[in-house]
Image (cartoon, rainbow, N blue to C red):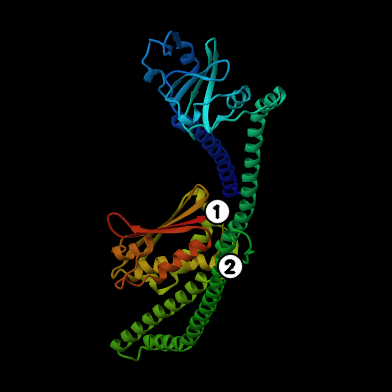
Amino acid sequence: MKTFARLIWRYVLTAVGVVLLLLVLTISLLGWISWREGYLQPQREYSYSEIADSMVETDNGMIFGAEHAPEEWMDGYAWAMILDEKGNVKWNYDLPDELDNHYSSSDIASFSRWYLDDYPLFCWSEDYGLFVAGLTKGSLWKYNLYNSPNVLQDIVHGIPLVILGMLLLVLIFCLWIGWRGTKRLRIVAEGLDALADGQTVQLPTDGFTGELAQKLNQTSSHLQKRNEMLVRRDDTRTQWIAGVSHDVRTPLALILGWGEQLEQDSSLPDTVRHKAAGIRTQCEKLRSLIDDLNLTSKLEYGAQPLRKETFTAGPLFRELVAQFYDSPLAENCEITLNQTNAAEHAQISVDRALLARLLENLLSNSVRHNSESVKICIETEIRENFLYLTVIDNGKGYPPEILAALNLQETTENTPHILGLHVVEQIAAAHGGKSIFESNYPSGARTCVWLPLG
């Protein structure tokens, strides 16, 4: 929903930005038109009324005022003339030949408002006659508009309302477009969330998001087929491992039983009994590997159900350590168990069989990877809402490549076998905890497993 809210605000801000952009563009356009009109219009130094007022009547006729030269007075105008009361041309300045005529009162009334033979002009009445200043053809449009005062007032008062109304309509349109787009995008966003959760997606492909929805539908279909293939592959792999493990266990049990019999047969030479003991030891390792392989396969694909029960941590760990002491591996190690008072009485909800496997793998790893007898210290304590199980030995410790494979998930062709420790990781994760493997100072291995309290 946060993404959806941000999307709506983005559209709202976009709509407001579009409105403001239109307003700025409109004002800029009006300003440019005004500037262009002022730039293209002929620039006149003096108005026609000022020129008319400056005219001086002499015995030789009309002349421009002495303040400026005629060219300066007429800067921006093409020609000028003065008509007397009868409509005759009394004086002129660069007057075109076709305009040197007699003009009746109706002619004067007409060209004073419009044009004189397509020449735009301006008129000013003086005591000496009618002063007329003209421009070149096509240099100016000259039309008179007639409106009542009420219309002009309505226009002046209505312009702000019209502008606001137009802006409001544009804003409503933008919001409507944004709402429609957001609605479509919300469907796509929900489809993406469903796709991320591994669900099948089938979105409508109409509207402007149709192409994107179609791509998501195709992606969902491909992922669904791939997931089905992976599930079938994983099921096949799990069944194959379980079948092979089952088939191997029967001959392995026979070999292990025969090895124990030969090892305990006092009538055999010591060398034969020693070899029989080696056969038994290797069979036990092989049986442990098969169990780990079966368990890691089930944990990885969720085929191993968790049968959680609530236990008191102190008695449970003492029982699990005592259980390990019954195995032949306990002959090559010395185990101490230290539990804090809080850990002794803490309640944890675990699968007892899996927790026993976790502890057995850690203890077996310390014994098998050290040629001499090893001292192992098991500690439990409570930190926040977790029980911290720490297993420390004084052996050779974890090689760097093992630590990289466990903690950094970096594996190479030369990475040693870590199936048993990988099972420890999986069991801890299945209980909602985690495990950390590190070297112990000054020597040995250190493993910390966090288990949530029940």
Front in this rendered view, residue 378 or 139? 139
Which residue lies at the image location 35% right of the left edge and 83% below the top edge? Answer: 277
Quarter placement of the C terminus:
bottom right
Where in the figure is residue 12, as x and y percent of width and height? 59, 42
Where in the figure is residue 100, as x and y percent of width and height? 49, 26
Question: Is 141 left or right of 66, judged from the image as shown?
Answer: right
Q: Which numbered tag is attached to residue 154?
A: none
Q: Earlier in the sequence, mark 2 or mark 1?
A: 2
Which residue lies at the image location 58% right of the left edge and 45% below the top edge? Answer: 11
Where in the figure is residue 87, as x and y percent of width and height? 56, 20
| Residue 88 visible within the image | yes
- SS label for mark 2: helix
Where in the figure is residue 278, as x and y percent of width and height? 33, 82
| Residue 302 visible within the image | no
Front in this rendered view, residue 313 or 154? 154
The amino acid type of the residue labelled 1 equals Leu
Front in this rendered view, residue 365 or 168? 168
Near mark 2 (Cα within 10 A), the count class, few <14, some 14-19 or many ≥20, is many
- SS label for mark 1: loop
The amino acid type of the residue labelled 2 equals Asn
Which residue lies at the image location 29% right of the left edge and 72% below the top edge? Answer: 414
In the rendered image of this protein, does residue 310 appear above or below residue 22?
A: below
**Which residue is label 1 attached to?**
453
**Which residue is label 2 attached to?**
217
**Furthest residue in direction bottom, as rendered:** 267
- Contact check, label 2 and label 1, Cβ < 8 Å: no
Question: Is 395 left or right of 360, judged from the image as shown?
Answer: left
